[in-house]
Amino acid sequence: MEGLVPNRGSIEATLSEWEELPGIREVPMGEFGGPRTVFYAADDFAKSKKLAEKIRKSGKVSPLIIVVDEEGPYILEGAHRYVALYELGARSFPAVVVRDAEEKG
């Protein structure tokens, strides 16, 4: 499942201070609230459904980028992949995990 991590530049564009955990990690689907916490638009669900079919056929998925901050984890990059994997019944997904190290407050 491990592959190229798309949009890695989003980390630097979003966070001023961060720590990237080593390697690609398997993140449990249960850490997130399901597709409706990510998307509301029908076209996003349609795109994810098409992507799910591609993933099902190939068995390959690029790692997502997950950020963990004081409020918990969120998907920085890969929401369509997350929803596609959710639809396929995946229990976890590959991800680069980044801790937001910026002090708030």
Image (tube, rainbow, N blue to C red):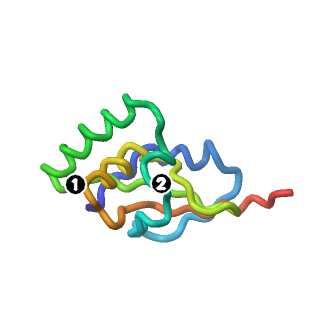
Which residue is at the front of the view, 99 or 85?
85
Callout 1 secondary element = loop
- Left or right relative to 54: residue 69: right
Secondary structure of the residue carrying numbered label 2: strand
Q: Residue visible at 79% across and 61% down?
A: 103
The image position of residue 25, as x and y in percent, is: 41, 69
Kindly report the distance in space between the C-alpha atoms of the residues bearing marks 2 and 1.
16 Å
Residue at (62% x, 63% y) in the render? 72
Mark 2 or mark 1: whose residue is earlier in sequence: 1
Q: Residue at (43%, 46%) from the top-left corner?
A: 79
Residue of label 1: 60
Q: Is residue 36 above or below residue 22?
A: above
66 is higher (above) or lower (below) than 77: below
Q: Residues within 10 Å of mark 2 (few under 14, many from 20)?
A: many
Question: Toward which corner of the image does residue 98 lie, by quadrant?
Answer: bottom right
**Disc number at residue 65?**
2
Residue 9 location in percent, x, y?
52, 44
Residue at 47% x, 40% y is 39
Going by the numbered disc 2, the residue's amino acid type is Ile
* The N terminus, quarter of image: bottom left
Q: Which residue is situated farthest in the left direction here? A: 57
**Left or right side of 48 for 17:** right
How many labels were placed on the picture? 2
Q: Position of residue 63 (x, y in %)?
A: 37, 56
Q: Which quarter of the picture shows residue 13? A: top right
Foreground residue among 3 and 55: 55
Residue 80 position by quadrant: top left
Q: Are marks 2 and 1 in contact (CB under 8 Å)?
A: no
Q: Position of residue 78 (x, y in %)?
A: 42, 47
